[in-house]
Image (tube, coloured by chain):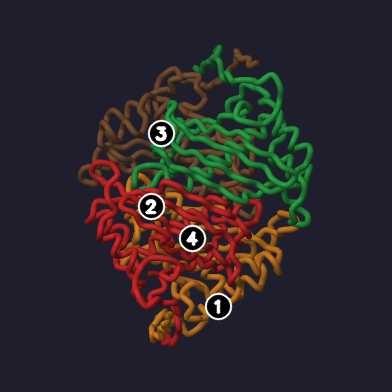
Chain colours: A orange, B red, C green, D brown
Amino acid sequence: MQQFRLIFETRVWYCSRMTSTNGYGPDNFSILNYRVIYGDTDKMGVVYYANYLRWFEAARSAYLRRRGLPYSDLENTEKVQLPVTEANLRYHRSAMYEQLVDIKVWVTDITSIQVKFQIEVSFEGDLLVRGYTHHAAINMATGRPTRVPENLVNALNRSEQITGNPFF
Amino acid sequence: MQQFRLIFETRVWYCSRMTSTNGYGPDNFSILNYRVIYGDTDKMGVVYYANYLRWFEAARSAYLRRRGLPYSDLENTEKVQLPVTEANLRYHRSAMYEQLVDIKVWVTDITSIQVKFQIEVSFEGDLLVRGYTHHAAINMATGRPTRVPENLVNALNRSEQITGNPFF
Amino acid sequence: MQQFRLIFETRVWYCSRMTSTNGYGPDNFSILNYRVIYGDTDKMGVVYYANYLRWFEAARSAYLRRRGLPYSDLENTEKVQLPVTEANLRYHRSAMYEQLVDIKVWVTDITSIQVKFQIEVSFEGDLLVRGYTHHAAINMATGRPTRVPENLVNALNRSEQITGNPFF
Amino acid sequence: MQQFRLIFETRVWYCSRMTSTNGYGPDNFSILNYRVIYGDTDKMGVVYYANYLRWFEAARSAYLRRRGLPYSDLENTEKVQLPVTEANLRYHRSAMYEQLVDIKVWVTDITSIQVKFQIEVSFEGDLLVRGYTHHAAINMATGRPTRVPENLVNALNRSEQITGNPFF
């Protein structure tokens, strides 16, 4: 005979600092959690140096989604994409297999034509990798640079809309 | 002035079927959630066919970890690894960017020398990819086949130890 | 003062078996060479199991290109894609860092709606991984199954057009 | 009846500038060719931004190998590794599917404790991505920084030993 098990829990999922006003900057960040898999590592036994850029992307994506503008909406409704024009990574320590890392992201600059993100990967409070990515706004129809849409500027300046869904 | 925001929530994280007895098989499964990133996709606009094997690995790893035997423990204490001897994937539908997919895994066979997993990737109830992986037990010191450790057999047969940590 | 160095060489790049007639099958194969990089390996010290599917793709692509129908032409002129419907891999030995592996591919079946490839990865004559991939023909405009284009059938049956360009 | 086809060719594989003396710098470069696969691309239709770091690695590896010191020898005989401490990428244009790109690499600095590489990815003469990577020398036994081995300094300063093997 089968039984069904229901698990109810009361948990604190987020405890994020809030500034009294909205706006981008180090106080308005998001943190994405990620569990390192075998496929992220290389024969040195630690995460391969290119794979942090995958995590950077996942964190930027979470930043937007949690502020009400999933990147796919930006593509589908604004017809705008944000290709990377520059990326930088400084490797301090290595992430290891099965670690549950924190990937913290915030916006450092918004101009009429580009957006800049800062990203920090850490494990249990120790900084592993710090980097940034710069993005241009591109009109998907023409493939040409365009203005950063107001919709996006608003989302980037918004505080995180807490949902409690840790996968959000 | 800064404020701190605490979010308490009551949620049902898992509602898994339990059989009255332990043991491997389709009733004793784990589900891992994963949000598709740009880096998983290819120019066809959907997830690249090789990347599902990354998810397969992540799900197997979660299966073990949630039963009290993280794969890294198997390596460090049992000095045993489980390299893949065969993998199979049937692609029914494509996973798309930003989808939060379910990766379901269970054990279909355990012998003295190998372990077999079945894995199903789905999105909102629709099956996307179904596959399996077979694994041999290898003694890390010699690189030679060895018996599947009793410790591992016990873990594979155990029910999921619910933790409520969705990243577990 | 600068000098320019010109290197002329006489080499045998290919020595492939030819059958007297065209047609697909084990006698009408292509071999792609690939040098294993760090990024292909995992912490077990060998190539990560998912990455062989990348090589499978590279070899299929070379097979078509060397027979006069680059896959991008198939997409651009025939408006047809060949998504994978099934993939299988049997792992016999592991490919290691810096090995120059041979990835051999041939066509095992062509029907009106699908194409099947066999692929073997070897190093210095030792078989490492053997597998296959099955592909459906899809109309890019509708996303629906379509007939395998005659253009493709002809290319698949053609012998390799030797070019001497090892990157071809 | 089977026939065997032998293809002899006379080709110019390399025509590299040589300076009259050895030494690192922009005149002492290597170029690695790579054919873009589907698995390198993302849904934007171009190469995913993280994958260029894979190519950077492949080019650095070729640079060393062609100067007589394969990276695996550095690991096995010198017991030294060169983990990346910083990486930078500037994305000018996108690499596309099936392009045969040139990945050009040279050494910009060698000190007692680190090595710096410059890398440029181009297609048919058009610059796509330019970047650099900095590397520390690490003693594999201790995991601690160590002096850049003389063996490595010599190799980095050596001119390319032309072999005519385009996969070298």
User: Are the residues flagged by discs 3 and 1 in contact, CB closer than 8 Å?
Assistant: no
Residue C39 at x, y = what percent? 43, 44
Q: CA gap, disc 2 to disc 3? A: 19 Å
- Camera-near label (1 vs 4) is 4
Residue A81 at x, y = what percent? 65, 60
Query: Is there one chain holding both mark 3 and mark 4?
Result: no
- Camera-near label (2 vs 1) is 2
Chain designation of label 3: C
Closer to the camera in the image, B83 or B12: B83
Residue B98 at x, y = what percent? 58, 66
Q: Quickly name the residue at label 4.
A: B119
Disc number placed over residue C48 in the picture, else none = none
**Can the viewer see residue D25 in this picture?**
no
Give me the residue at 36% from left, 38% from top.
Answer: D115
Relative to D119, residue C1 above or below? above
Q: Quickly name the residue at label 1.
A: A158
Residues packed near mark 1 inside 10 Å, few (<14), some (14 to 19) or many (20 plus) = some
On the picture, is B101 further left or further right than C108?
left
Q: Of callouts 2 and 1, which one flags the residue occurring earlier in the amino acid sequence?
A: 2
Count of labels in the image: 4
Residue flagged by tag 1: what amino acid is it? Arg
Residue flagged by tag 2: what amino acid is it? Val
Q: CA gap, disc 4 to disc 2? A: 25 Å
**Label 1 secondary element:** loop
Q: Quickly name the residue at label 2.
A: A47
Residue flagged by tag 4: what amino acid is it? Ile
Chain designation of label 2: A
Query: Is there one chain holding both mark 1 and mark 4?
Result: no
Residue flagged by tag 3: what amino acid is it? Glu
Disc number placed over residue C98 in the picture, else none = 3
